[in-house]
């Protein structure tokens, strides 16, 4: 843990040197009014991305292609967060400002930095380029290239990008949220995906490509797009298919997610659904997803963790959107960042959600496997989400649960739940609040064992994820 402390300190000082606040590595780095009525015995210790073999998470590092954010302003905060894969967006319009002249310096710097940090990259091919008539829109909701010259220039751009980053980038994603532009029909989206993916595969045969990148989580739209791909025999070009699908209550999305998975299973035995962009503002917004709601740093942290662990529990790779607030020119600052940024794109604050995500990443990595048979039940006066996991090597158990009945709010009042687990061998359980990372001893008189079953009585839970976990899994 000494190495981790030095890494966090170095990254924090680097952020401070760039004008940003230092990362708080203390045991009290995340504070809320929560009082579960238990004895605190410790706090989750963060683990950097360099200390984990991998996890279910992707961290959004978007909009550098349109200069809405500055890589150097936030890069020092990435590794200490603990997420090993980042999402980047290629910028055709930024790279080819004069026809036929590519200047990759900006993207080279980011990709080389990320690789130097030991990060895996998911690189979107990007938007269009108005330097070509009919070259497509350069921002969100912009249309695909339509002219013969525009499409030919797009092909050259994708080829140039794939050639340049072969051996550096294996994972790629298609044009972002094409379904927002209502001129794009499913057949158009499929055709443009095929066109783009085939170029990447020709240059990088082992590329793993995420198809569609749909804003929607509508199973009907997915079915139409997959049907169009299947007509051309091209479904197997893709390793994943991406959806976004924002919801005020993150848990309300999972009936659709399961329908998306079932839809994909009709077309492929190997491809998987992937949640490619989801996050929550830390204040009221008037634009973008989840707008016109009184969000705060409290509700943002709760929302982000429920999305992360809900996705994990439904066996879907999951993106955290996004590392830093960004100033979307012509619209407003998008406040879904884990870091607070000024209008001139400087990091001036670390939000509660940063530390909450850091806590979650420290616990849930690829050393845990979900228990797929029913292993846990929760009795409470409200609905709940609950999932069980075991450490792959030791078999040590962990249960996560939360109140999933509504949109996260600012309250930190717990209610009691009766939690029964089966075939999970707890020896020294602890109760953990993931938002703050605080770890509490579990009273022996509130755990009753009977054969294969263990009852945990009056477990405090609320509208953010809490754990009942083997102590050795948490306090390492």
Image (spheres, helix red, strand yellow):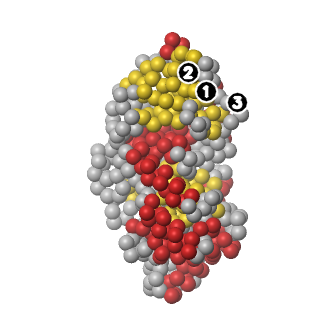
Label 1 sits on residue: 424
Residue 215 appearing in the image: no
Question: Is 426 drawn above or below residue 288 in the view shown?
Answer: above
Q: Is residue 114 left or right of residue 379?
A: right
Binning the other alpha carbons within 10 Å of mark 1 as few (below 14), some (14 to 19) or many (20 upward) gives: many
Question: Is 248 drawn above or below residue 388 in the view shown?
Answer: below
Mark 1 and mark 2 in contact? Answer it, CB < 8 Å: yes
Q: Nearer the viewer, mark 3 or mark 1?
A: 1
Q: Quadrant of the C terminus?
A: top right
Residue 454, numbered label? 2
Residue at 49% across, 35% down: 386
Q: Quadrant of the N terminus?
A: top right
Image quadrant where residue 444 sits? top right
**Does dot 1 land on a helix, a strand or a loop?**
loop
Residue at 45% across, 41% down: 306
Label 3 sits on residue: 394
């Amino acid at each position: 843990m000494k190495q981790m402390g030095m890494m966090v300190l170095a990254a924090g000082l680097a952020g401070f040197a760039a004008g940003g606040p230092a990362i708080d590595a203390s045991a009290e780095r995340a504070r809320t009014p929560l009082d579960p009525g238990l004895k605190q015995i410790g706090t989750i210790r963060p683990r950097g991305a360099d200390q984990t073999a991998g996890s279910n998470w992707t961290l959004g590092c978007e909009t550098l292609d349109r200069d809405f954010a500055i890589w150097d302003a936030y890069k020092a905060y990435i590794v200490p967060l603990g997420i090993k894969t980042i999402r980047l967006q290629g910028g055709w319009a930024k790279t080819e400002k004069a026809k036929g002249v590519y200047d990759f310096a900006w993207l080279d710097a980011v990709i080389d930095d990320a690789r130097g940090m030991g990060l895996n990259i998911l690189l979107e091919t990007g938007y269009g380029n108005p330097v070509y008539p009919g070259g497509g829109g350069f921002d969100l909701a912009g249309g695909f290239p339509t002219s013969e010259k525009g499409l030919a220039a797009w092909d050259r751009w994708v080829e140039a990008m794939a050639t340049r980053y072969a051996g550096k980038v294996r994972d790629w994603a298609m044009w972002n949220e094409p379904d927002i532009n209502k001129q794009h029909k499913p057949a158009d989206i499929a055709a443009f995906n095929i066109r783009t993916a085939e170029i990447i595969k020709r240059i990088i045969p082992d590329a793993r490509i995420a198809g569609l990148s749909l804003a929607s989580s509508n199973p009907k739209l997915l079915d139409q797009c997959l049907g169009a791909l299947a007509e051309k025999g091209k479904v197997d070009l893709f390793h994943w298919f991406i959806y976004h699908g924002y919801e005020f209550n993150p848990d309300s999305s999972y009936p659709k997610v399961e329908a998306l998975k079932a839809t994909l299973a009709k077309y492929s035995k190997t491809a998987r659904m992937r949640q490619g962009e989801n996050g929550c503002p830390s204040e009221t917004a008037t634009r973008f997803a989840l707008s016109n709601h009184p969000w705060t740093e409290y509700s943002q942290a709760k929302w982000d963790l429920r999305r992360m662990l809900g996705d994990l529990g439904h066996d879907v790779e999951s993106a955290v959107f996004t590392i830093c607030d960004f100033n979307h020119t012509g619209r407003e600052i998008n406040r879904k960042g884990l870091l607070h940024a000024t209008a001139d794109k400087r990091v001036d604050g670390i939000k509660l959600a940063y530390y909450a995500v850091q806590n979650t990443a420290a616990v849930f990595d690829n050393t845990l496997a979900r228990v797929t048979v029913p292993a846990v039940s929760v009795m409470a006066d409200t609905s709940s989400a609950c999932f069980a996991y075991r450490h792959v090597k030791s078999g040590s158990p962990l249960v996560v649960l939360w109140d999933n009945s509504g949109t996260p709010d600012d309250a930190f009042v717990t209610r009691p739940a009766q939690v029964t687990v089966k075939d999970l061998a707890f020896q020294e359980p602890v109760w953990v609040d993931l938002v703050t990372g605080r770890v509490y001893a579990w009273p022996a008189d509130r755990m009753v064992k009977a054969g294969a079953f263990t009852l945990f009585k009056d477990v405090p839970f609320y509208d953010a994820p809490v754990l009942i976990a083997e102590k050795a899994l948490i306090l390492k």
